[in-house]
Image (tube, rainbow, N blue to C red):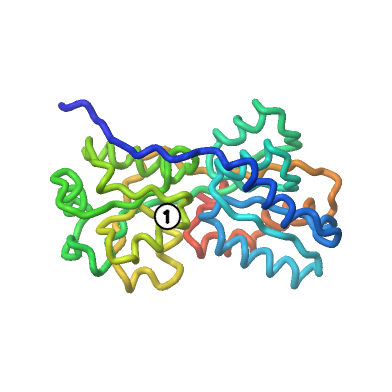
Amino acid sequence: MNILYIKILKLFSFIKTREFIIIFIIIFSNKSFADTPVIAVASNLTAPITEIANQFKIETGAEIRLSFGSSGNLARQIIQGAPYDLFISAGLEYIDFLSEHGAPIKSASEYIYGDIGFYVPNDSSIKNAITINSVIQALNFNSFRKIAIANPEHAPYGIAALQTLINAGAWIIEKDHLILAESVSQIVPFALSGNVDIAIIPYSFILQDNLISKGKYFPIPLFWYSRISQYIVSFNDTSQVSLKFREYLQQETTQNILLQYGYHPIGNE
């Protein structure tokens, strides 16, 4: 068997200091904002956590602010001083990263996990694929224009995509055929651009934006990639609103929302 190899275009993995300072000033300098807890959330959870936060405000009258991004970039913002109250991270490695760099973690617990699959847009050159084997064959023979995945340098869904490609036998993908999205949520625009034949996206995305009408989704076997667990990390145990929101995230009605978006709450496997 050939040595499995994937040639990946390197991207910058650190946010420029100047860019972070601008973000910090805009988000955190306003006094009224400073009194409202800020929750950092892995971008794959944009839709469900936004819905949950809106419902939380309706039920409690309390307001929170959400900051979405790749887990890696959010973790680096925290190390650089961003005063997030909670962090919903995709991947345990970023909690380890925070611990190693002295982040004031009060608690951390596994929360949910998600699934991934191959997405083939309707205008793909392999649009006639009817099984996952058809997609794998296209990958193995390089009979596609481009594939889009999240950047594995700072997105756990990108790591899972990389593991999938290796296990699918796609041992080489030239950089001209590979698009690395900054976060998993950025893959969808690429997939629908008309230039991408294959994308690896979370199952939850198929349940949003009517994607199933714009392409085909082929679930990837769970044993092809490490489980993509997401964790709740707390940095502030004095803010009553953030504590209340963390408790709210554990409620059955909230977890039902996550189930509707294709996520599996821990304990409900």
- Numbered marks: total: 1
Residue 233, compared with residue 214, is above or below; it is above
- Is residue 238 visible to us here? yes
Position of the N terminus, as image quadrant, is top left
Of all residues, the one furthest to the front in this rendering is: 18
Q: Describe the element under mark 1 as helix, strand or loop.
A: strand
Residue 100, compared with residue 17, is above or below; it is above
Q: Is residue 25 rendered to the left or right of residue 40? A: right
Q: Is residue 188 rendered to the left or right of residue 14? A: left
Query: Splitting the image into 4 quarters, where does residue 10 fall?
Result: top left
**Could you tell me residue 267's position as x and y percent?**
57, 47
Amino acid tagged 1: Pro
Q: Is residue 52 rendered to the left or right of residue 222? A: right
**Could you tell me residue 217's position as x and y percent?**
31, 61
Residue that appears at 75% across and 68% down: 57
Q: Nearer the viewer, residue 116 or 179?
A: 179
- Name the residue that disc number 1 marks: 202
Crowding at mark 1 (Cα within 10 Å: few <14, some 14-19, many 20+) = many
- Is residue 223 visible to us here? no
**Could you tell me residue 190's position as x and y percent?**
37, 60
Q: Nearer the viewer, residue 58 or 97?
A: 97
Residue that appears at 24% across and 30% down: 4
Residue that appears at 72% across and 57% down: 26
**Could you tell me residue 2's position as x and y percent?**
17, 27
Residue that appears at 62% across and 39% down: 76
